[in-house]
Amino acid sequence: MKKANINLTPEEVILKMACRATRHALTKSRNSLTSDELNKFASIDVSNNPVLQECQHLFLEQVFCSCHDEDMVPKLALDTYHRSIGLLLIRAGVASNLKLIAPIIPELGFRTSANVIGEFRFVDKVLPIAK
């Protein structure tokens, strides 16, 4: 069993965190979806599988409501929810391997929300009053 090294200086802790961030950046793994990928995800026909259908609806609702996973799904069902989202991403052609997508699935909908909403341009204008 590996023992944790508790006697680290603050500089060593920062250095270790920087190494982890660099490793993550080198893998070029994203943690959000684009609007095109979200459209592919939404267009999957899963009417024959009620579990996948419910997870698809929950994920899309999560994206457009900007909710966390725990707000949408009970804690006991989170693993099933994440696996279902992974399978749907593979069916949509967004991911090719569940092992590659698994580390970024938690909170994927929450992070995708800001990405998708940021693509829209909101125009402020006063609507005419109906007479």
Image (cartoon, grey):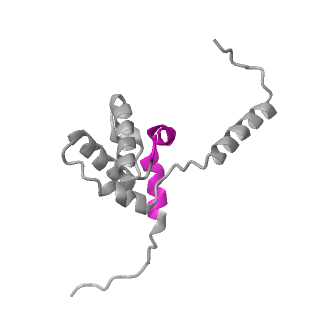
Q: Name the residue furthest bottom.
A: 131
Relative height, residue 35 to residue 112 (above, below): below
Q: Closer to the camera, 92 or 36?
A: 92
The residue at 41%/81% (across/down) is 125
Residue 81 position by quadrant: top left
The residue at 19%/48% (across/down) is 47
Which x, y percent locates residue 14? 75, 37
Which x, y percent locates residue 16? 73, 34
Q: Closer to the camera, 113 or 93?
A: 93
Residues in magenta, as a range: 96-117
Which x, y percent locates residue 3? 68, 14
| Picture quarter with the N terminus | top right
Q: Name the residue furthest top.
A: 1
The residue at 25%/46% (across/down) is 53
| Picture quarter with the C terminus | bottom left
Q: Is residue 26 left or right of residue 99?
A: right
Q: Name the residue furthest front.
A: 96
